[in-house]
């Protein structure tokens, strides 16, 4: 773990300058949730990469705090032929960081690359007969059938980010990471100052033209970059993060840990706030390619072992403003959330009964490799509790506490555990990823094309398609209740409850948007 003296050494150069000089450069020092181990925002579902992506790249549409979609890179669109023809017109003056103009010829391959890896994007492309650049500024979708959620897919705020890249990068094989960061967003990525595991730096892009009109809201509206420079400093130790923030060495700490919140709140120079109203649903994700979790009976039996209160208390303590239980597929309080079948998690826990159910289902003592991120204080406790619970019901658990970046790389492995594979990993599904079947990547049951774990669940897939076809909100809710009931049968993961992350920053800063860390609009004084 990083020691305080290491942090002081790391920041000595910038702190040597008088505070007034630092303010004159309009610099913000930020402590992110973790390292940006993967830079390509369409190559991973890690939220830290999505957050990085929204500095460097822009999206065709933005989402408001009320979850409505508004034009962002596009000036507007028209819909013709009974919903089968969409024409999207780009705003004038859009430029990439390398100085080239943003053209429809860049947008088309960017959409295709995004859709190759994203569930919502793939649904849009399944409905698309033809996607073309009619001119430098006009993108045309010709659809097989109406897809009214087209702006939602192209402006989705959950992972994976629908980033628009230059054509030369967007034509990169979707299964190959892009490492050259050239976007058209408000900030440039500084590769010459990037120190993996320690520092990520961005500078304001003078060629960015915010959209005119509208209200700054979530990812929608004008994005005005007041900052000249943004530095992300990766500090794994929460106590060191708190000390750096309190001393004024850092300006903003993305995820203050619950145990340090009382100390932060007593400091009159600091403010705390919950940015994401949807929270983050914790989960234990199964690998269904190999025993024992290729057996749905074993996955179902483990539902009886999960006490969401136990998991949430381990992460966030007793303060119920920081977490909720009774959590199924969708975030509590959102329009499609349902308690259908929730009794599988809320009935009295009986671990001896679960142990017998596992044996009856066919568990024979197979080793279970459970990956938990050692450097994520809001995730690793879920892994520790999960390992303990699985051991108590008789499973042969191999708890592997590893660094988050390594976990992100390893979870893509389809090898058996004796060749570096895995059986379970710990993560969260955060923000608008939790709101509807379009973006909820954990419920996909399309085998090789599904999220890590690769479940094959045709009934979940059919219900997801039924949701797309539902004519109104009431019908969508009914489908989601059915979908959650099927989820308890297929069990692609174990939901552990939802946490609401608290961010902490100096009161001298203002302009922070809701949702997740975004750096336009922010200014000091």
Image (cartoon, helix red, strand yellow):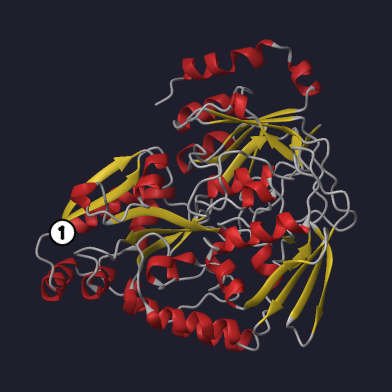
**Does residue 227 appear in this view?**
yes
Residue sitting at 71 percent across and 41 percent down? 519
Tell me if residue 186 comes above or below residue 294 in the rendering.
above
Tell me if residue 236 comes above or below residue 87 in the rendering.
above
Q: 9 and 276: which one is in front?
A: 9
Give coordinates of residue 196: x percent, y percent: 49, 30
Q: Is residue 40 left or right of residue 340?
A: right
Q: 505 and 53: which one is in front?
A: 53
Q: Which residue has dot 1 on it?
A: 395
**The image quarter in which residue 179 lies:** top right
Q: Is residue 329 left or right of residue 158?
A: left
**Looking at the figure, which quarter contains the N terminus?**
top left
Q: Residues within 10 Å of mark 1 (few under 14, many from 20)?
A: many
Tell me if residue 243 comes above or below residue 380 in the rendering.
above
Residue sitting at 26 percent across and 73 percent down? 300
**Does residue 327 appear in this view?**
no
**Looking at the figure, which quarter contains the C terminus?**
top right
Give the total number of marks visible in the rendering.
Answer: 1
**The image quarter in which residue 471 lies:** bottom right
Give coordinates of residue 81: x percent, y percent: 79, 86
Residue sitting at 86 percent across and 58 percent down? 214
**The image quarter in which residue 400 lies:** top left
Tell me if residue 393 comes above or below residue 272 in the rendering.
below
Where disc 1 sits, the SS reads loop
Give coordinates of residue 327: x percent, y percent: 44, 68
Give coordinates of residue 269: x percent, y percent: 68, 30
Q: 501 and 16: which one is in front?
A: 16
Residue sitting at 61 percent across and 50 percent down? 274
């Amino acid at each position: 773990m990083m020691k305080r003296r290491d942090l002081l050494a790391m920041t000595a150069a910038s702190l040597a300058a008088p505070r007034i000089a630092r303010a004159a450069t309009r610099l913000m020092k930020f402590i992110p949730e973790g390292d940006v181990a993967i830079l390509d925002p369409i190559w991973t579902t890690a939220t830290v990469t999505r957050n990085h992506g929204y500095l460097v790249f822009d999206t065709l549409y933005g989402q408001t705090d009320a979850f409505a979609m508004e034009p962002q890179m596009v000036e507007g669109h028209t819909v013709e032929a009974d919903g089968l023809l969409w024409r999207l017109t780009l705003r004038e003056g859009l430029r990439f960081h390398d100085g080239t103009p943003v053209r429809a010829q860049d947008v088309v391959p960017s959409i295709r690359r995004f859709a190759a890896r994203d569930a919502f994007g793939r649904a849009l492309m399944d409905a698309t007969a033809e996607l073309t650049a009619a001119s430098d500024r006009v993108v045309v979708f010709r659809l097989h059938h109406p897809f009214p959620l087209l702006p939602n897919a192209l402006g989705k705020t959950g992972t994976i980010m629908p980033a628009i890249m230059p054509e030369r990068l967007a034509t990169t094989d979707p299964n190959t990471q892009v490492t050259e960061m050239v976007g058209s967003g408000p900030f440039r990525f500084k590769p010459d100052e990037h120190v993996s595991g320690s520092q990520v730096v961005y500078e304001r892009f003078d060629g960015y033209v915010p959209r005119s009109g509208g209200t700054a809201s979530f990812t929608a509206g004008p994005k005005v970059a007041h900052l000249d420079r943004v530095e992300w400093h990766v500090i794994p130790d929460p106590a060191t993060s708190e000390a750096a923030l309190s001393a004024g060495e850092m300006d903003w700490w993305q995820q203050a840990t619950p145990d340090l919140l009382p100390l932060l709140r007593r400091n009159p120079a600091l403010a705390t706030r919950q940015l994401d109203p949807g929270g983050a649903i914790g989960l234990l994700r199964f690998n269904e390619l190999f025993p024992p979790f290729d057996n749905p009976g074993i996955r179902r039996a483990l539902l009886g072992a999960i006490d969401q209160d136990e998991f949430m208390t381990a992460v966030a303590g007793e303060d119920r403003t920081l977490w909720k239980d009774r959590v199924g597929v969708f975030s509590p309080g959102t329009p499609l959330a349902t308690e259908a079948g929730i009794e599988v998690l809320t009935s009295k826990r009986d671990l001896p009964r679960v142990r017998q159910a596992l044996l009856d289902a066919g568990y024979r003592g197979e080793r279970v490799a459970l990956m938990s991120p050692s450097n994520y204080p809001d995730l690793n406790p879920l892994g520790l509790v999960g390992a303990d619970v699985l051991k108590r019901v008789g499973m042969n658990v191999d708890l592997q506490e590893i660094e988050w970046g390594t976990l992100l790389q390893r979870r893509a492995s389809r090898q058996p555990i004796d060749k570096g594979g895995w059986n379970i990993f710990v993560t969260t599904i955060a923000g608008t990823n939790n709101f509807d079947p379009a973006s909820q990547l954990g419920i996909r049951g399309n085998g090789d094309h599904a999220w890590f774990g690769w479940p094959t669940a045709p009934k979940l897939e059919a219900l997801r398609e039924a949701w797309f076809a539902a004519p109104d909100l009431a019908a969508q809710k009914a489908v989601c209740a059915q979908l959650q009931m099927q989820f308890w049968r297929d069990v692609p993961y174990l939901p552990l409850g939802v946490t609401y992350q608290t961010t902490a920053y100096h009161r001298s800063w203002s302009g922070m948007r809701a949702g997740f860390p975004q750096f336009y609009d922010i200014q000091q004084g």
